[in-house]
Structure formats: C-alpha cells, structure tokens
Amino acid sequence: MDGRCTCGTIRYRLKDRPLFVHCCHCRWCQRETGSAFVMNALIEAECVEVTGTPDVIDTPSESGKGQRISRCPTCKVAVWSTYSGAGPKFMFVRVGTLDDPDACPPDIHIFTESKQPWVVIPEGVPVMKQFYRRSEQWPAWAIARAKAAAER
C-alpha cells in the first residue's frame, strides 16, 4: 500500500499489511485531528519505506508519555505517529493518508466512552469503552510479527 501527504513531499509504502487498525474516539484524538476520531494503522517501522523527510513534532498525549507526530514540512499534514508506549519500532500510520484508505477498515473502535453521540459504529467490529488487551483482540499472526519486531 502506498500513501502520501497532501502535497506529495512525504511519500511512503507499506511493505506488509498493518498489524491492526485502531479507530480511536478519545477526546484527545478529536482535538488533535479536528475530527470525530482518528484511524491509525499500526505497523512495524521496518515495514515502511519513506521518501522525504518529515518534521517530527514531540506532542503531549493524554497518557502523559507523549507521542512524536511526523508531519510534512510543506503542507503540515500528519502522516504517522510513534508513541512512547510502543516505541520507535512501530508506526501508527494515518489511514486517511493512504492512496486507498478503504483498504484499512478498523479492526477495533477504542475509547468509545467519549465518542461523538452521532457516530454510529457498525456491527461486527469490537468496541471498547477504553483500551484493550492485545492478547485478546489481535490475531495470532499480528502478535507474532509485533513480538519479532520488538525483539530485533
């Protein structure tokens, strides 16, 4: 899968499918994106080829651990983040920056206790009031890939 910022200064290619796709409805993400939720495709950083050099902005997060948002230096679009909890070996790619965002529907909806009341979540996708345990939601292949990446 390929993706880019709006102006095309930052381009990327996912060399494998994402491990898991979050649709986060927390108020923090709502504020950061100016939207009702954010869609992030979690993938190993080693599985992403990047063309261009993003501006990396250290940004506070509700957890207090912070995140690093990679933005295009020209159009300022957020293309991906890394979070302190997951570390730099994993990227949270903004699904809306993919050339075909339809290819990455959410695997889970998180922090739905603060979702906008007019957002209707379709049936068939797990819904969590807050976060979740990876061991209970991720498929075995994704857990194995994430573990292997963390150990490298």
Image: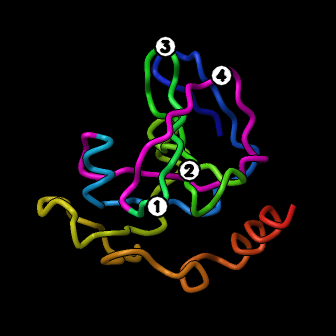
Sequence order check, earlier mark of 1 and 4: 1
Question: Which residue is rendered at x = 76% and y = 44% of the image?
Answer: 15
Residue situated furthest bottom in the rendering: 136
Residue 30 at what x, y percent from top left? Answer: 27, 50
Q: Are marks 1 and 3 in contact (CB under 8 Å)?
A: no
Give the residue pinned by disc 3: 74
Is-magenta flag for residue 42? yes
| Distance from Cα at disc 2 to Cα at disc 1 | 9 Å
Sequence order check, earlier mark of 4 and 2: 4
Residue situated furthest front in the rendering: 64
Task: Say which amino acid is labelled 3.
Answer: Thr
Q: Are marks 2 and 1 in contact (CB under 8 Å)?
A: yes
| Distance from Cα at disc 1 to Cα at disc 4 | 25 Å
Sequence order check, earlier mark of 3 and 4: 4
| Distance from Cα at disc 4 to Cα at disc 2 | 17 Å
Sequence order check, earlier mark of 2 and 3: 3
Camera-nearest label, 4 or 2: 4
Give the residue pinned by disc 2: 92
Viewer-proximal residue among 84 and 30 = 84
Task: Say which amino acid is labelled 1.
Answer: His
Task: Say which amino acid is labelled 2.
Answer: Phe
Could you tell me which secondary element the residue under label 1 belongs to? strand
Residue 105 at what x, y percent from top left? Answer: 46, 56
Task: Say which amino acid is labelled 4.
Answer: Thr
Q: Is residue 65 left or right of residue 28?
A: right
| Residue 12 in which image quadrant | top right
Camera-nearest label, 1 or 4: 4
Give the residue pinned by disc 1: 22
Q: Residues within 10 Å of mark 1 (few under 14, many from 20)?
A: many
Please give the label number shown on residue 53: 4
Question: Which residue is rendered at x = 49% and y = 13% of the image?
Answer: 74
